Amino acid sequence: MRFMSTLAGLLLFAGTMVALGAPAEAAGCATVLPHADGYGITCADVQRHPQSDGSELRDVTMTSTAIFQASGGTPVISPLSRPITVRVYLPKGYDPQRATRYRALYLINGGGDNYDSWTTKADLVSLVRTAGSFDGIVVMPTGGMTGWYANWAGRTDGYFAPKWETYHINQLIPWIDANFNTVADRSGRGLAGLSMGGYGTLRYAAAHPGVFSVIGAFSPGIDLRAKPAQRTISDSMWQSGAAINLTDLGEFRVNKYENGSPLPVLDQEVQRRYRLDTLFGPHTTTVFHGRTVDDWPAANPADLVTQGKYAPYSGRLALYAGGCASLPHVPDGTEPAPAACGYDTGASDDATGVSEPILGAYASEFDTTLTTLGVGHRYCYTKGGHDWNAWPAYLVDFLRYAYGTAPALCPSP
């Protein structure tokens, strides 16, 4: 999610709708997809959006056996299956029979966003054209409004839970490879995302080094030990939980209730721990910034980096974060953030939720750890905010770094 502490904050940067080009063309699943059903996915509808430059945005509405599943009781929604849409960018001249297969970039959404955000809050088609170095396809699935790219360990108030990791890794990726002319191995797959999607990128990359070869994290959540991050995640579980869109909510939320009572527990520290355990499984405790705090090491990028989980991406990892208070010069992507940025993770402990300066501070620590461990990467710190004024520039820079030549200087959104 965009790490905001209220649902209003989640939706703050709605931006301006970007036209999809010519009117949509409906197409039967079997007409344009050679293997429309499989891997736990059933295709329901295909809409094709031709673009003025000859490229295409193709929307595939589908159901997945991984979203949702019964958990802890009888689900209150029926049917459990919910339609979800994947938007696929196909480059100009896309040829399903081309001998040289296309690379695929999976671009995952932030909190409060959906599969279409990179084309409604930004102009993905123009961004790809501007980057000039990427000639593959871009796969834009939904990760839920606040699904946190996890196979939930617990459940919603309505006794069901999403298995986002199963859907993305075990179902969607092989389904894409079966239906589009992609390089069906690690060498041809990239992964990038913003905010909650930046966290998801780091989490998936650590767990599945055999699936992706290049990763980009934009304003990512990095350290689950940080109290502001825990508070923001807890708030997101209360506000939207497993919702895919704003028509869900209700029983899609997550709360702990008094024994045998319909009244939620009032102690917000108890709720915070319960909600994060619902997402990531039972917590451990550790000392962090001089305090004993909860941690989920298997889901925490700040722990995963110390375990060497990002070594497989050396030279193929890009990290972007804003919130730098004062930028003495435009960085070149190889240097640590200077003191002038004012990044201070310790000073953020009492914040009610995270902000871009807090995310920037943890990104700076992450950069230092990667450098210490000898993991080659591109790190760009900026004065940008946690919004769509910054993220498009990060994507263009990432595409050039990952699929062409790294720019001499970082973007300055």
Image: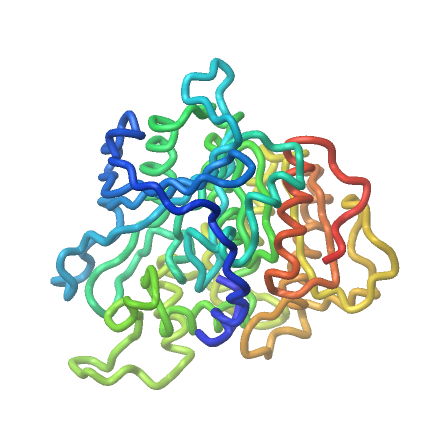
Q: Position of residue 65 (x, y in %)?
A: 22, 45
Residue drawn 68% across and 49% down? 369
Residue drawn 42% across and 17% down? 97
Choose top left, top right, bottom left or bottom right for residue 154: bottom left
Q: Describe the colour scheme in one phrase.
A: rainbow
Q: Position of residue 207 (x, y in %)?
A: 46, 41
- The answer to whether 4 appears left or right of 48 in the picture is right
Residue drawn 69% across and 31% down? 404
Residue drawn 70% across and 37% down? 376
Choose top left, top right, bottom left or bottom right for residue 29: top left
Q: Position of residue 334 (x, y in %)?
A: 78, 44
- The answer to whether 235 appears left or right of 312 in the picture is left
* 350 up-or-down from 408: above or below: below
* 33 up-or-down from 231: above or below: above
In this view, which residue lies farthest toward the right? Answer: 328
Q: Position of residue 254 (x, y in %)?
A: 31, 70
The reply to whether residue 297 is in sight is no
* 59 up-or-down from 381: above or below: above
Q: How many marks?
A: 0
In this view, which residue lies farthest toward the top? Answer: 99
Q: Nearer the viewer, residue 374 or 89?
A: 89
- Quarter holding the C terminus is bottom right
The reply to whether residue 332 is in sight is yes
